[in-house]
Image (tube, rainbow, N blue to C red):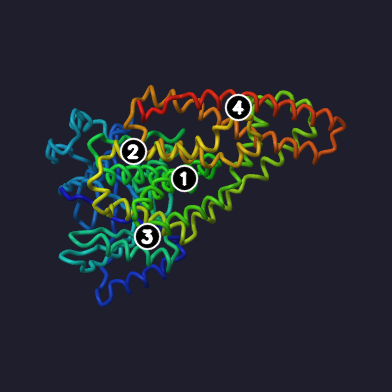
Amino acid sequence: MSQEAELKLLVDSSQAEQVLKLCQQLAKDLDGEQMELSNRYFDTADLRLRQAGIGLRIRRRGDQLEQTVKLAGAVMGGLHSRPEFNVPIEQERPDLSLFSQDIWPDDFPAFELQADLQEIFSTDFTRTCWRIPSQDGVIELAFDQGLIKVGDQQRGIAEIELEVQGGELTDAYKMARRFITRVHARTGTLSKAARGYLLAGKTTLEPWPQTEFVEQLHGDNVGQGLYRALTYGLQFWQHHDACLNETPSVRAVAGITDGIRLCKVVLQQLAALELDVNDHIVRLEQMLGHLGWLSRYDGLTELTADDGAYHRALSEHQKLYDYIVEQQQHAVQLELVQNLSKRDDYQLTLLELGELCQQQPRHPELMELALKPWATQRLRDDWQQVITLFNRQDELRPEHYLKHLPVLQGSLQLGYCLGYLFDADDREAFRAPWLDMVRGIREIMALKLLREAIKDTDEVNTDRLLNWQTVQLESLLYALEHSRRAALKQDPYWEA
C-alpha cells in the first residue's frame, strides 16, 4: 500500500508548451521521462464501488498491466490524499482476489462484486514526468495530456500532478504556486475518475442543500476544532467551485459564498488567537465583494417565486411583474464569478488555505485549551455583539435590520463551526427564531427592491401599488418584531 498525497492542478490545453517549459525549469538539469498510459475504470452497474468511495482501474504501460484500488480519501485546496493499492495483473479484466482482503472497508462485499464488474470509461494520456529531489525523498512532477473516453464522447485532460514521495509537502506547494502564477493553473478538485463518471452520466455534480454543523469532538483542543471547521468550510467552497465549472448556476455561486464566509469566520478566530492569517481574511473579503449581487438576486427571486408571498398579487400587474423578472435576470453575474474563479489570487487562496489545513500551525494556547470551554466563552462573547445591536426597547426600522444582518449571519455561522458540541434540541430551539429573523430581513430587501421597481415602471396604479408595498412592509416588520422578542427570550444553548 502507498498513501497517495499529491497536488492536482488543471491547466488550459493551450498552455501545454508553457507548462512543459516551467516543468523543465523546476526540474533544472533533470531529464523528463515520457510514457503512454492507457487506463480502464471498472464498477458495477449500480456503482457500488463509487458509492463506497472506491476507485478501480487497470493501467497499461507498454506490455505491463497493473490494477489499482484507491480508497476514500480527502481533497483540500487541490491536495488529494487517499490510500492506494497496486498489484501486477496479466489480463485486462480486474481480479479482486489479488488484493489482500484486509484492504476493504468493513462489511464491504468486494469478492461478491467480481462477476458484476464492467468498464465505465477509459483514459488515454501522455505523461511527462520528472523526479525532483526534496529532503530525504522526491517529488514526482507529472504533466498529463490526453482524453477521457466514454463511447463516442470524450473530454480533454491537461493536468499537473505533484506527488510527494518521502519529500517535503512544502516544496510541492512552492511549485504549485509557480504553476498558478506563471501558467494560470487551477486547483483540481475532481480526479480523472470523478470526471470520467460524470462524462459517462453515472454521477452528477450538484450544489449541496445547505451548510451543516461541523462534527466536532469533545476531547479536541482549540486548534483541532478550528482546523476541522476550516477544512469543512474549504471543502464546501471547493465543491461548489467545481459545480460552477461543470454547470454554472446561481446555486453554485451561493455555495461558494457560504463556503468563503465559513472560512472567513474560522480565520477570524485564528487571528484572534494571534495566528498570522490576516492576508487571507482580506482576500476573502475582496472575493465576497464580487459576490454581493447575490443579495439583490435573492430579493428579486423572493418577489417572483411561484410559492412566495408576493407572486400572486404581482402577477396581476403584468408590466411590473415582467420588469421584476427582467431585473432578476440582469442581476445574475455568473460570468463575473467564473472569471473571478480563474484569477491567480482566487486560486492561490484555495491552495494556501489547503496548505494551512494540512500544516495546522498553532501556538501553545491552541494546543492546551480544551475546545468546549473555549467554544462556550467564544460563543458567549460573540453573541453579546448581536444582543447589543438587537436588544432595543423601541421597534427597529428596516435600515437597522439591514445594517446589522452581517453581524447576525456571522454569529450564526460561528454556531455552525462550534455548535455541534452542545445539545442538538437546545441548539435548534435557540437558533430557530434568529433564522426566522434572517429570512425576514432578506424579505425587507425584497420589498425595498419592489418599491424601486414600482417607481421605475409606468404602471397606471403606481400609488395603489406603493401603498400596498407599504402595508406589506409594515406587516413584515410586525412579524420581525415578534421574532426578535421571542429570540431574545431564548436561553443560549451553550449556557444550558
3D distance between C-alphas at marks 4 and 1 = 25 Å
Residue 100: percent from the left, percent from the top?
12, 39
Within-10-Å neighbours for mark 4: few <14, some 14–19, many 20+: many
Q: Nearer the viewer, residue 85 or 463?
A: 463
Q: Quadrant of the C terminus?
A: top left
Q: Nearer the viewer, residue 122 or 437?
A: 437
Residue that mark 1 sits on: 261
Within-10-Å neighbours for mark 3: few <14, some 14–19, many 20+: some
- Which sits earlier in the primary sequence, circle 4 or circle 1? 1
Q: Residue furthest bottom?
A: 29
Q: Amino acid at mark 3?
A: Gln
* In this rendering, the label closer to the viewer, 3 or 2: 2
Q: Nearer the viewer, residue 369 or 100?
A: 369
Q: Mark 4 near mark 3, Cβ–Cβ under 8 Å?
A: no
How many marks overall? 4
Which quarter of the figure has residue 310?
top right
Residue 166: percent from the left, percent from the top?
17, 60
3D distance between C-alphas at marks 3 and 2 = 48 Å
Q: Mark 4 near mark 1, Cβ–Cβ under 8 Å?
A: no
3D distance between C-alphas at marks 2 and 4 = 29 Å
Residue that mark 3 sits on: 145
Q: Secondary structure at mark 3?
A: strand
Q: Amino acid at mark 2?
A: Ala
Residue that mark 2 sits on: 375
